[in-house]
Image (cartoon, rainbow, N blue to C red):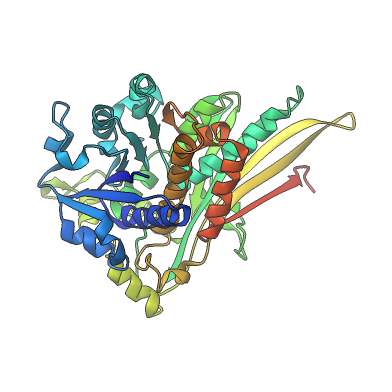
Amino acid sequence: MDPITIAFFGLGAVGSSMLICLAELAERDGVPLRFVVVVLDPDLARDALCHAERLFDRIDFVGVVDFAPLLAADAEPPASLIGTQVLINAAHPAFNQPLLALGLRLGAHLVDLASDMYDAETERSLTFAQYQADADLRARGLTALINLGISPGVTNFLIGQRLVELCAARRRDLEIESVDLYLLEDIDSDEVVFSWSPLVALEELAQQPRQIRDGRLQILEPFKDPRDYTFPNESKPVRQYPLYQEELLSLHRSFPEIQSIGIYTGGSEVELVKALFQLNLLSKRTLPQQSELTVEAMVRAILPGMNKPRRIEDYLRNGVIRRAHFAAAAEIRVTETVRNERQTVIETVGLSYLRYHGLLNSPYAGATYIAYPTAVGAAILTWHALAFLREDGGELPGVITGEDLARQLPRPRAEAIRRDLVGWDIDLFSSVRDATPV
């Protein structure tokens, strides 16, 4: 069997863990796999894989001074990428479009982890820019797996799987009234530890959140209209704030009949950004006598950045990080006629990652509690999508989201995804309860 070649563009906290997980999946399934890692600094990439050095003989590290010439529309693909079957954007959403173009030139499938929600075209069209390449991908028989990870990604898959099952019941009186997704990003530590890029967190949480209500997009004020939600393994409710994230546009596109969709987030990291916002430290106003410097720019400059993997590992070993919990719970409100009466129930599907300290003494040591589930979620979804194409003779033409995978993968393959998520310490949960007020 010829090896599959997967190229990573960028290899930070998520990319390194995703590469490790793909290698583990390939070893388990007896599939030969090679990697090309395209980065600005190969030494930093090797350091991100410091606990997975056994994989180095399967990795070709390619250093570039600048990504722009490589991703230019008229650039000839370098020899190191010829024959590559999959390109993964582990760097930045701005690379999505150039990598799609490169993938079309190479005849390779594409994977990205997030979209640029705030670019002008997405703001105007409310459609991810990757769909501009949909027709070209279909014509070439290529797949672009977009917004893959834990949230968005696995969340879309789990929600989509349940919505598809509900729709398959073909009950004419069944109505899916709403979908609300609640996210928890909570870390208990003796120091301020950002599990994600602080700059990304500031941009995302300080944006005006949006929701779909009565079938229309509504714009809200940041940190207004909070809710309380109790997650599994949490003893008390967590304050949740509206958020504008990929799931909103993705689910609205896939299930336009659902009139109400909302995304909420909360936890210690969110509360930190909320405090900065309420103290007016995210203001675009300029400083007195310094018209070239805004308050927000100053805060961004002095905030601590993401810690390197070795520092995160030290924090875990030394007890600086005591507990961390990432969770996502989607509540699907369903109404149908039961015993000649209209009954409304709330179906919950979700995931929880609470075994963070278990990463010590593993190849993933040094990953953050957000980077790890994001990486293994993306790897597992990617691996089974590729296996469906390669082994099952299936087709996934064009741009594919998590809920598209839930709809198009055969049930045994979808259930294998769920088992693998649990195998890599992502707990899954589901429940149904009566929505009638007590």
Q: Is residue 51 above or below residue 255?
A: below
**Relative side of 371 to 288, left or right:** right
- Can residue 107 be seen at all in this image of the molecule? yes
Q: Is residue 419 above or below residue 398?
A: below
Task: Identify the residue at image location x=34%, y=36%.
Answer: 110
**Relative side of 399 to 59, left or right:** right
**Relative side of 139 to 164, left or right:** left
Q: Return the x and y of residue 254 as percentages of the image width and height.
A: 53, 27
Foreground pick, 394 / 155: 394
Q: Return the x and y of residue 318 as percentages of the image width and height.
A: 37, 80
- Can residue 242 be seen at all in this image of the molecule? no
Q: Return the x and y of residue 156 as percentages of the image width and height.
A: 52, 40
Which quadrant holds residue 316? bottom left
**For the image shown, how many numbered marks are present on the structure?**
0
Task: Identify the residue at image location x=33%, y=24%.
Answer: 133
Which quadrant holds residue 147? top left
Q: Residue furthest front?
A: 1
Foreground pick, 33 / 241: 33
Task: Identify the residue at image location x=49%, y=32%.
Answer: 393
Task: Identify the residue at image location x=57%, y=48%.
Answer: 416
- Quarter of the N terminus within the rendering: top left
